[in-house]
Image: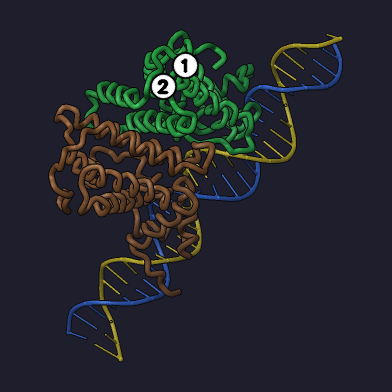
Chain colours: A green, B brown, C blue, D yellow
Amino acid sequence: MPRAGLTPSVVTADAAAFADEHGFEALTLAALAKRLGVATPSLYKHVDGLDGLRRAVSLLAVAELAERLQASAVGRSGPEALRAVFASYRRYALEHPGRYSSIQRSPSPSDTEAQRLFARPVEVITAVLRGFAIPDERMVHTIRALRSALHGFVDLETRGGFGLPEDVDASFALLTDGFLRQLEPVPDGGGPIGTGA
Amino acid sequence: MPRAGLTPSVVTADAAAFADEHGFEALTLAALAKRLGVATPSLYKHVDGLDGLRRAVSLLAVAELAERLQASAVGRSGPEALRAVFASYRRYALEHPGRYSSIQRSPSPSDTEAQRLFARPVEVITAVLRGFAIPDERMVHTIRALRSALHGFVDLETRGGFGLPEDVDASFALLTDGFLRQLEPVPDGGGPIGTGA
DNA sequence: GCGCTTGGCTAATGTCATTAGCTTTAGGGC
DNA sequence: GCCCTAAAGCTAATGACATTAGCCAAGCGC
């Protein structure tokens, strides 16, 4: 019998694709093994059980998300950057609902690798907000408000929490505008957001 | 062997308590049966399997939440009512994380009973927002923004998504203020929110 | 060509959900 | 007070998964 050519990356990537197609809840070792044409226990050679697989998918997802956010902010600043980040955050969740769902379980504090990766999207957001005139003592609250609005909207949308599906784009635009209106933009703040964040 | 005296209500209430203590994910027929001192299959006399149990808990939770929101809005209007609703929404989620978690899976469109109950919290919010000068065409977007902010914050908080646990109250106060600032309150709009909503 | 690492397999165990079918409780009608 | 029946609870059996142990062969390094 020829080898299947699996590696941790291949398994994780396939798991992410499966989660996007069938939901993160439906991601199971048995289902993934079937998809890969392999017996279930074989997966243990590449990932550390179901928990390890879930963790791997969430790390993949959060890294991808951070990358997207970063990319959308590069070369932009202030409101323009914030709009871009909002839009790409939402787009990522809509394109990859299973992956997005996977990052909703916060990693254990002892998992420093995961902690590091999970911090990245927040860092991008923080960097973008530096282009606004936000007093230091309010910064953390503002970041939380931003994350809340963004996550809340996307979570409700991806779960089908909004009754009418038609003008969700308009709702999101209004949310974005509303958030921007709360920030006092610096006339022309720090330059564009670079790669360093 | 004497009877355990179970009923659908008792089973559901205990399931809700279990979910609050151990998380909605951990709610399992086997665990609940053990808690009730009964064999697992016995539960089928009262609830329709695991899915039925989850549904029952979510209906219980969403009804309780609606009641809380309603109660906090009664006798108040405008910003005062909105603040009260924000606060009681968050309090419910913090006091009953398992129940709150249970209402995050939106019911199937064919489940009209669930649809009806799930609409109630939104109706309370809608009633409160009527005390503000919001143009009709913006109402649905505003409701969505409000739900997003509220749900997003509470979801992040209950999942431990905020790094520093200390001044979360301050963050929530800021979120509430920020949202209110976006609404143009009617000088003295429609009276307080009544029981009919 | 040889051997060792390692990917993949089968077998076995344990947990959980679910169904079938039995037993006994306990309340209502007499 | 006594039976009779609906229903509460039980045990047994099945099937999906996750997980562990231990076997075997593929294919790379020499």
Is residue B157 left or right of B81 when viewed as pictured? Answer: right
Q: Is mark 1 on a helix, strand or loop?
A: helix
- Visible in this render: residue A158? yes
Camera-nearest residue between A37 and A99: A99
Q: Quadrant of the N terminus of chain B?
A: bottom left
Which of the 4 image quarters holds residue A93? top left
Neighbours of disc 2 within 10 Å: few (<14), some (14-19), many (20+): many
Camera-nearest residue between A173 and A12: A173
Q: How many labels does the image show?
A: 2
Camera-nearest residue between B104 and A186: A186
Which of the 4 image quarters holds residue B157? top left
From the image, tell me which residue sits under label 2.
Answer: A89
From the image, tell me which residue sits under label 1.
Answer: A68
Which residue corresponds to the image point at 40% horizontal and 58% vertical from the top-left? B43
Asked if badge 1 and badge 2 are on a common chain, one would say: yes
- Visible in this render: residue A26? no
Which numbered disc covers residue B98? Answer: none
Neighbours of disc 1 within 10 Å: few (<14), some (14-19), many (20+): some
Q: Are marks 1 and 2 in contact (CB under 8 Å)?
A: yes
Q: Mark 1 lies on which chain?
A: A
Q: Is residue A13 above or below residue D14?
A: above
Q: Is mark 2 on a helix, strand or loop?
A: helix
In the image, residue A12 lies at what x, y percent?
56, 24
Q: In this view, does B13 lie above or below A10?
A: below
Type of the residue with mark 1: Arg
In the image, residue B167 lies at what x, y percent?
48, 42
Which of the 4 image quarters holds residue C22? bottom left
